[in-house]
């Protein structure tokens, strides 16, 4: 590996779902959930850390399947700048990604009105639940970090309660919880189907991003 390059084999990808880890493939280091990130960085000593997975749009200009690369990550009153060198090298391979601030959230932002309020308040173009934890842990460890996320729901979309009820902490889908929620709110079925379609577009975008990043060093 040449000086100043980032070898994907030594990059730690932090994801929120097992499916996102599967998209990265067995040749990559993937950590599902950021709870043990500090320990993982200390143990594995990665050359860089990348937050990789789905996100929700806050900007009306984004649609499902768009790739987003964070220029900085907002966590409350703090902002963490993504590593410029790593982001530029990723941009060469992810030429169609949209760049802008990413907002971190401890909970799902599923209401369209909440998305609009957060966009106005923060100026962020998208929101997810891992990138702020990645940014904070990477800064503490002195490791460069970047964010590569794919939009699964638009700013104007309100996620049905049935979808929100089905999210597990490890990113898996709690099917019985979804079915139970649908029994209580059967009119949400069309919105649930649309949510699944949006997630599918996001996963396909992540597959393309994983392929584009490749296995060779990011020179």
Image (cartoon, helix red, strand yellow):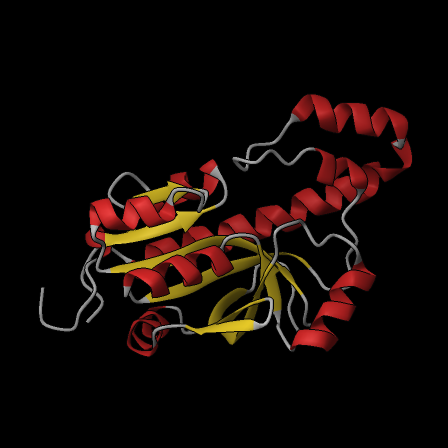
Q: Is residue 97 shown above or below 165?
A: below
Name above or below for residue 110 compared with residue 190: below
Q: Residue at x 30, y 45 (%)?
A: 40
Q: Residue 137 at x, y = what percent?
A: 38, 57
Left or right: 39 with respect to 75?
Answer: left
Depth check, front residue: 124 or 105: 105
Q: Residue at x 46, y 43 (%)?
A: 33
Q: In which quarter of the image is residue 39?
A: top left
- Residue 97 shows up from this direction: no
Q: In which quarter of the image is the N terminus?
A: bottom left
Q: In this view, does 77 lie above or below 106?
A: below
Q: Residue 157 at x, y = what percent?
A: 77, 57
Residue 30: give x, y in percent of width and height.
34, 44
On the rendered image, what quadrant is the C terminus found in? bottom left
Q: Which residue lies furthest to the left in this view?
A: 2
> Is residue 165 in view?
yes
Q: Nearer the viewer, residue 106 or 57?
A: 106
In the displayed structure image, the side of residue 145 where residue 8 appears, left or right: left
């Amino acid at each position: 590996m040449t000086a100043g390059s980032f070898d994907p084999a030594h990059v730690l990808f932090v994801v929120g779902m097992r499916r996102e880890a599967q998209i990265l493939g067995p040749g990559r280091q993937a950590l599902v959930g950021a709870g043990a990130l500090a320990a993982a960085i200390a143990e594995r000593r990665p050359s860089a850390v990348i937050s990789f997975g789905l996100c929700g749009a806050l900007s009306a200009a984004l649609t499902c399947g768009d790739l987003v690369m964070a220029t900085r990550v907002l966590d409350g009153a703090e902002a963490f700048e993504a590593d410029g060198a790593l982001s530029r090298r990723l941009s060469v391979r992810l030429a169609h990604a949209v760049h802008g601030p990413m907002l971190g959230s401890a909970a799902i932002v599923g209401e369209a009105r909440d998305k609009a309020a957060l966009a106005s308040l923060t100026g962020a173009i998208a929101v997810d639940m891992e990138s702020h934890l990645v940014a904070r842990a990477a800064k503490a460890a002195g490791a460069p970090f970047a964010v590569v996320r794919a939009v699964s729901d638009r700013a104007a979309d309100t996620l049905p309660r049935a979808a929100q009820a089905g999210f597990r902490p490890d990113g898996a889908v709690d099917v019985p919880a979804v079915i139970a929620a649908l029994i209580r709110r059967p009119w949400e079925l069309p919105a649930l189907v649309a949510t699944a379609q949006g997630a599918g577009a996001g996963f396909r975008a992540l597959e393309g991003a994983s392929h584009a990043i490749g296995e060779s060093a990011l020179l």
